[in-house]
Amino acid sequence: MSGALALAVVTGAVLSLGLNSWLESLGIRLGWLDRANGPLKVHNRPVPWTGGIGLWLVLCLACLVRIAENGVVPGLADRKVLAVVAVAGLGLGAGLWDDFLWKSASRPLPKLVAQMICAGIGATLLLSSHRS
């Protein structure tokens, strides 16, 4: 691993830990919690719904740094980076929709379908940017 890549990985990990720690306490304070009270639950204590937000924000920051390194005009590689951010945002949206709207009657199949649609969109964007 090159020095620049190692620095990027360590910086991303530190940012992710710090941001997710703050988002975890925010989720607890606001009551945005998944309670361990159903047959589909694998955790023993309430878990905040905010982890995906922190991961997506760190991903966005890393992608912005990547684009800034290459200048203002995005090239082919930067379109792929933006496609990853967009699809991750769709996945985050599906997860938040599930967390905030479906928790009273959580159904795994619609969530799986939404995640598969996000993955399909991502594959399409990545493949189409590869051809252009």
Image (cartoon, rainbow, N blue to C red):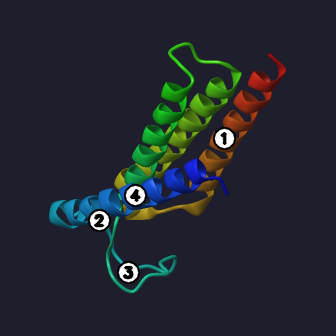
Q: Amino acid at mark 2?
A: Ser
Q: Nearer the viewer, residue 54 or 123?
A: 54
- Mark 4 or 3: in front is 4
Q: Amino acid at mark 3?
A: Asn
Query: How many angstroms separate mark 1 from mark 4 (CA)?
Result: 26 Å
- The reply to whether discs 3 and 1 touch (Cβ–Cβ < 8 Å) is no
Give the label on residue 96, or none: none
Residue highlighted by disc 4 = 16
- The reply to whether discs 3 and 2 touch (Cβ–Cβ < 8 Å) is no
Name the image quarter holding residue 43.
bottom left
Give the label on residue 117, or none: 1
Question: Which one is earlier in the sequence, the residue at label 4 or at label 3?
Answer: 4
Question: Which one is earlier in the sequence, the residue at label 3 or at label 1?
Answer: 3
Quadrant holding the C terminus: top right
Please tell me which residue is depicted at 40% across the width and 44% down the height of the picture.
Answer: 57
Give the label on residue 37, or none: 3
Please tell me which residue is depicted at 46% across the width and 39% down the height of the picture.
Answer: 60
Q: Nearer the viewer, residue 14 or 24?
A: 14
Please tell me which residue is depicted at 57% across the width and 29% down the height of the picture.
Answer: 82
Q: Amino acid at mark 1?
A: Ile
Question: Which one is earlier in the sequence, the residue at label 4 or at label 2?
Answer: 4
Most extreme residue toward the top is 73
Q: Position of residue 118 (x, y in %)?
A: 63, 41
Question: Which one is earlier in the sequence, the residue at label 3 or at label 2?
Answer: 2
Q: Position of residue 127 (x, y in %)?
A: 79, 30
Residue 87 drawn above or below residue 50: above
Question: Which one is earlier in the sequence, the residue at label 1 or at label 4?
Answer: 4
